[in-house]
Image: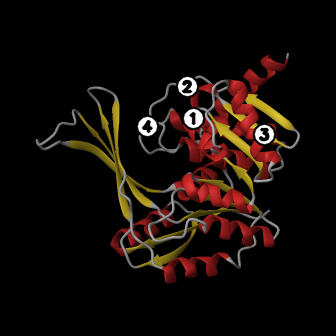
Amino acid sequence: MKPIVTLTVNPAIDAFCLADEVVPVRKVRTREEYYVPGGGGINVSRAVKELGGETVAFYMAGGLTGQALEGMIERLGIAGVRVPIAEATRVSHLVHETSTGQEYRFTPEGPEVTEAEWQHLLEVLSVIDAEYMIASGSLARGMPVDFYARVARMVKEHGGRMVVDTSGAPLHWALEEGVHIIKPSRRELEHLVGRKIAAPKDEEAMAAEVVRAGRAEIVVLTLGAQGVVVATRDGVQRYEAPKVDTKSPTGAGDAFTAGMVYGLVNGKPLDRAVMLGIAAGAATAAAPGTSLATKPAVDAVFAQVKAQAARKTA
C-alpha cells in the first residue's frame, strides 16, 4: 500500500497559548504555550499518522523557522521532504481567552517564493508515484494561480488521484484541469458555480453540477454543524454531523480530509470513508487549540456517526 502524500506550499509553525484576557496596548500575559507543525497538508499528515496510516509530507520551508518546522515534523515521526526556500517560514498564533472562551487567530501571509523555487518543487513532485496526493492550504506569494492544476496534471499522468482543499483562483484552476476530490465550503461552492445557495436543495444541485461538468469526480461539501453533502456520478448523499462539545475548529477540516482518504486507501466504500472523515473532523473540533484528535477519540465519534446513519436508514 502506497503512503498518502500531502503537499503544503505555505506551511507554518502553529503557536498556541492561553490568556485570561486579550486587551489592546497592555502587555497580555500568556501561559501553557506549545508549538506544532502546521499548514493544511502537514495537518493532514499528522492526522493520517495518528489514525495509523503511512504518509509522506512534501513542503516548502526556509529560514530558522523552516529548520524548526523540519525538526518538529521529524520528532512526530512523519516522513517529510523539505524543499528549501530563501525566506522564512511563517509562525501563526492562536490565543484562547479563558475569560470568554473566545479564540483569536493571527495568521501571517507567509514568505514570497521565487519562480526558481516553485519550479524546483514541481521537479521534485514530478517523480512521485502516489495513489493519493492531497494538496491542502493556500499558495505562497509568488506562486502561479494554476500551480495545483500543474500538480494535478502530473499526478494523473502517473495514474494517481488528486485531492485539492483550497479556495479562490487556485481551486478554480485545479478544477479546470480536473481532479478526483474537492472539499469546498458553502461559500467556495457558490464562488465555483457562480450563484448563491438559497436552500438545501441548491447545495446538492450545485455540488452535482460540478461533477457533471467533469471538474471533479467527487465533491464533498462541508457544512459544519449542518453536516456534509457528497456528490458523485452515482448521485448525491447528505450526512448528519455528530453532536460534540466544540472547543476549537482549528484543524478540523484537515482531519476530515485525512480520515476520508485514509478510509479510501484502506478499502472502505465512499460512504464509510466519508463517515470516518466526519468523525475525525468532529473529534478534532472537540480537542483544544491546535491539537488534533487522538485515534481513540476518532473511533468513539465514528461509532456515533455510524449509529446516526443506521437510524436514518432504518
Mark 3 or mark 1: whose residue is earlier in sequence: 3
Query: Which residue lies at the image location 45% right of the left edge and 78% below the top edge?
Result: 114
Do tag 4 and tag 1 residues touch (Cβ < 8 Å)? no
Q: Mark 4 points at which residue?
A: 288
235 vs 60: above or below: above
Picture coordinates of residue 237, whole percent (x, y): 79, 31
Do tag 2 and tag 3 residues touch (Cβ < 8 Å)? no
What sort of colour scheme is used for the picture?
Answer: secondary structure
Do tag 2 and tag 4 residues touch (Cβ < 8 Å)? no
* In this picture, residue 16 sits left or right of residue 10: left
Residue 57 or 229: which is nearer the viewer? 229
Local crowd size for mark 4, using a 10 Å CA cut-off: few (<14), some (14–19), many (≥20) = some
* In this picture, residue 295 sits left or right of residue 157: left
Q: Can residue 303 be seen in this view?
A: no
Mark 1 or mark 2: whose residue is earlier in sequence: 2
Local crowd size for mark 3, using a 10 Å CA cut-off: few (<14), some (14–19), many (≥20) = many
Q: Name the residue under label 2.
A: 244
Query: Which residue lies at the image location 35% right of the left edge and 57% below the top edge?
Result: 108
Q: Is residue 146 visible?
A: yes
The answer to which image quadrant residue 126 occupies is: bottom right
Could you give the CA–CA distance between mark 3 and mark 1, rounded to whole angstroms?
28 Å
Amino acid type of disc 4?
Pro
Amino acid type of disc 2?
Val
Query: Which residue lies at the image location 61% right of the left edge and 34% below the top edge?
Result: 196
Q: In which quarter of the image is the N terminus?
A: bottom right
Q: Mark 1 points at which residue?
A: 283
Local crowd size for mark 2, using a 10 Å CA cut-off: few (<14), some (14–19), many (≥20) = few
Q: Mark 3 points at which residue?
A: 208
Local crowd size for mark 1, using a 10 Å CA cut-off: few (<14), some (14–19), many (≥20) = many
